[in-house]
C-alpha cells in the first residue's frame, strides 16, 4: 500500500456539504435547558430575545441528523478549509511507538483556531435575519477574533466583552479584534448593570468567562436588533464544529484508517464534540467502538471533579439552566493558570455522553506537563501549538507511549485546535520556570457546589 502522506488535505469537492447533529443518534437526549424561575423546559421562542431564530432552532433540534451548510458559509469555509489531517510521523519516531498518530490542525486561519467554523454561520444567520449587531464574550481571545473576522465579512457591528485578565495580558489579540472593526470592552466593565455590580463587590477582579457572558447578554437584550452569540458549550456550536470530524472521516476513508482512540481538549466541549462527531455516531449506532478521551486542565477540572447538575451558564445568572458537568457558575481558575479551557461548565451534549459512558474518559493534566508536551511537539512536528491544544497532545503522547509498552498499533486521532502565537506570555512563564501547578483543593471547590441552583420540580 502507498505510504500515507504526512499531510492530507481534501479537495473542495470532497468537503462535507452538511453538518452532523450528534443528538439525533443519542437514544437518551441531553436534558433540556430550563427556566431558572419555573423549572420549565425552555421553548424555542423563549430563546428568540437572545439568539437569532435559525440558531435557536438548531439549538433545540434533537432529531435532525444532517443540516445543509448554506452556500454563503461554504464559500467562506473554502477560504481556509478543508484543514489538513496530519500524520505525526516524526512524533511517532521520537517516541518509538507503533501507534499511528493523526492530528487535525485547525490553526491555519487568522483567528488561529477552530472557532471560525462556528463564527461564520453565526454571523451569517444573524445577517440573514436582518439584525443590527451582535455581542459576545471572549476569554483567551480566539473566539472574539474569529467572530470579529466573520462579522467584518458580513458587515455586522460587534461588541466583544474580553475577560479583563486576558485583555491586559494579550494586547496583540486585542489589536486583531480591533483590526476587524469590533468594539472591545474589558470585562467586568461599567457599561452594564451586571458588570457594575460585580465590580462593586470585587473592584480588582480580573474577570471570568461567566462574567463576560453576563455582560454580553445584557448588552444584547437591552439593545434593539442585537443578539448574543457564544463560541462554545451550545448545541448549535457543536453542530457547526462537526465539520472538523466529518473532514477527518472523509480523509481517513481515503487512507484506510479509523481511530481507535479519539482525543480532544475540552473547554466548553465544542472542538471535542466536533472532532469525534462522526465516530461517536458510529459508536451510538453500535457499528464501531472507538475510545474517547476529553482532556482538561487540573486547575479547571469540570469533568473530572465537577458535579453533573443544572447550573447557570454565566456568573451573572441571567442564562437558562443547563444540565452539565460544572464547578459552579462562580468558579474562577487560579490567576497563574495559563492554559485556557477555563470555563466552569461543559457542553450538555458532551456531559450527557460522558455521564452515559459513550465518552469513555475525562483526564486532567497539570499545566507544566502540558507545556512540556507543547515544546516537544513544536520541536518534532514544527508546529507551535496553542496551550489548549497541548492538553490533547499530552494525552496523545501518553497513549502512544502506552502502545509502545503493549506493542499495540493503535490509531490515535487528536484535535490540534490552534496556534500558540498569541500565547507567548504563557510560554515565557514556562521557559522562565515561573509557571506553577495549582490544583484546587476540595475545600476550594465546595463553595461552587454549594452555589448550584435548586431547580423547581427537578431531582438531581
Ligand atoms: C476555545 C479553544 C479551545 C476550547 O474550546 P472548546 O469549546 O472546548 O473547543 C481549545 N483550543 C483552542 C485553540 C481554542 O481557541
Image (cartoon, rainbow, N blue to C red):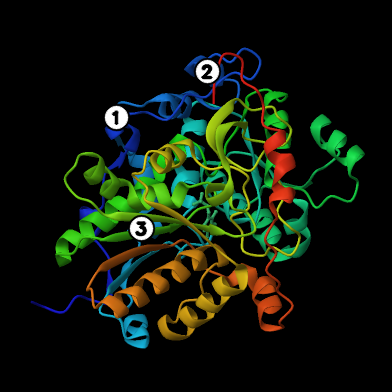
Q: Neighbour class for label 1 at 10 Å: few (<14), some, many (≥20)?
A: few
Q: In this figure, which residue is indicated by the disc labeled 1?
A: 27
Q: Neighbour class for label 2 at 10 Å: few (<14), some, many (≥20)?
A: some
Q: Measure the alpha-carbon separation of dots 1 and 3.
A: 32 Å
Foreground mark, 1 or 2, reads 1
Q: In this figure, which residue is indicated by the disc labeled 2?
A: 42
Residue at image location 51% in from the left, 71% down from the top = 385
* Label 3 SS: loop
The reply to whether residue 314 is visible in this rendering is yes
**Which residue ends up furthest to the front in the rendered image?**
442
Q: Earlier in the sequence, mark 2 or mark 3?
A: 2
The foreground one among 172 and 212 is 212
Residue at image location 52% in from the left, 44% down from the top = 232
Q: Which mark is residue 81?
A: 3
Q: Neighbour class for label 3 at 10 Å: few (<14), some, many (≥20)?
A: many
Question: Exactly how many numbered labels are in the figure?
Answer: 3
Residue at image location 61% in from the left, 31% down from the top = 311
Q: Which mark is residue 204?
A: none
Amino acid at each position: 500500500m502507498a505510504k500515507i502522506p504526512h499531510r492530507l488535505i481534501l479537495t473542495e469537492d470532497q468537503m462535507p456539504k452538511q453538518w452532523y447533529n450528534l443528538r439525533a443518534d443519542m437514544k437518551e437526549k441531553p436534558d433540556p435547558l430550563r427556566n431558572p424561575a419555573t423549572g420549565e423546559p425552555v421553548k424555542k421562542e423563549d430563546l428568540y430575545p437572545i439568539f437569532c431564530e435559525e440558531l435557536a432552532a438548531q439549538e433545540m433540534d434533537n432529531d435532525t441528523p444532517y443540516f445543509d451548510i448554506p452556500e454563503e458559509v461554504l464559500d467562506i469555509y473554502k477560504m481556509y478549509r478543508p484543514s489538513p489531517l496530519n500524520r505525526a510521523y516524526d512524533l511517532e519516531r521520537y517516541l518509538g511507538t507503533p501507534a499511528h498518530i493523526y492530528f487535525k490542525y485547525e490553526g491555519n486561519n487568522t483567528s488561529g483556531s477552530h472557532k471560525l467554523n462556528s463564527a461564520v454561520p453565526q454571523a451569517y444567520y444573524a445577517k440573514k435575519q436582518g439584525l443590527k449587531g451582535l455581542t459576545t464574550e471572549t476569554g483567551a481571545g480566539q473566539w472574539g477574533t474569529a467572530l470579529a473576522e466573520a462579522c467584518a465579512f458580513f458587515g455586522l457591528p460587534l461588541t466583544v466583552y474580553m475577560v479583563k485578565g486576558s485583555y491586559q495580558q494579550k494586547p496583540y489579540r486585542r489589536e486583531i479584534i480591533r483590526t476587524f472593526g469590533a468594539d472591545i470592552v474589558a470585562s467586568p466593565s461599567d457599561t452594564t448593570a451586571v458588570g457594575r455590580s460585580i465590580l462593586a463587590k470585587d473592584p480588582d477582579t480580573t474577570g471570568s468567562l461567566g462574567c463576560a457572558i453576563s455582560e454580553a447578554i445584557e448588552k444584547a437584550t437591552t439593545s434593539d436588533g442585537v443578539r448574543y452569540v457564544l463560541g462554545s458549550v451550545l448545541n448549535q456550536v457543536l453542530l457547526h464544529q462537526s465539520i472538523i470530524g466529518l473532514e477527518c472521516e472523509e480523509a481517513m476513508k481515503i487512507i484506510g484508517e479509523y481511530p481507535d482512540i479519539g482525543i480532544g481538549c475540552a473547554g466548553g466541549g465544542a472542538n471535542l464534540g466536533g472532532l469525534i462527531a462522526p465516530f461517536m455516531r458510529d459508536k451510538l449506532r453500535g457499528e464501531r467502538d472507538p475510545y474517547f478521551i476529553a482532556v482538561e486542565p487540573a486547575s479547571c477540572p469540570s469533568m473530572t471533579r465537577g458535579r453533573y447538575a443544572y447550573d447557570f451558564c454565566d456568573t451573572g445568572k441571567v442564562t437558562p439552566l443547563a444540565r452539565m458537568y460544572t464547578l459552579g457558575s462562580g468558579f474562577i481558575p487560579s490567576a497563574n493558570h495559563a492554559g485556557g479551557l477555563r470555563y466552569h461548565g461543559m457542553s450538555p451534549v458532551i456531559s450527557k455522553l460522558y455521564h452515559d459512558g459513550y465518552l469513555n474518559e475525562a483526564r486532567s493534566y497539570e499545566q507544566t506537563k502540558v507545556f512540556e508536551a507543547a515544546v516537544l511537539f513544536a520541536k518534532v512536528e514544527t508546529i507551535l501549538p496553542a496551550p489548549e491544544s497541548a492538553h490533547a497532545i499530552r494525552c496523545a503522547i501518553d497513549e502512544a507511549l502506552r502502545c509502545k509498552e503493549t506493542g499495540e498499533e493503535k490509531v490515535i486521532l487528536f484535535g490540534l485546535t490552534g496556534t500558540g502565537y498569541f500565547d507567548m506570555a504563557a510560554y515565557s512563564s514556562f521557559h522562565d520556570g515561573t509557571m506553577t501547578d495549582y490544583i484546587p483543593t476540595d475545600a476550594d471547590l465546595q463553595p461552587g457546589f454549594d452555589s448550584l441552583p435548586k431547580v423547581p420540580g427537578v431531582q438531581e
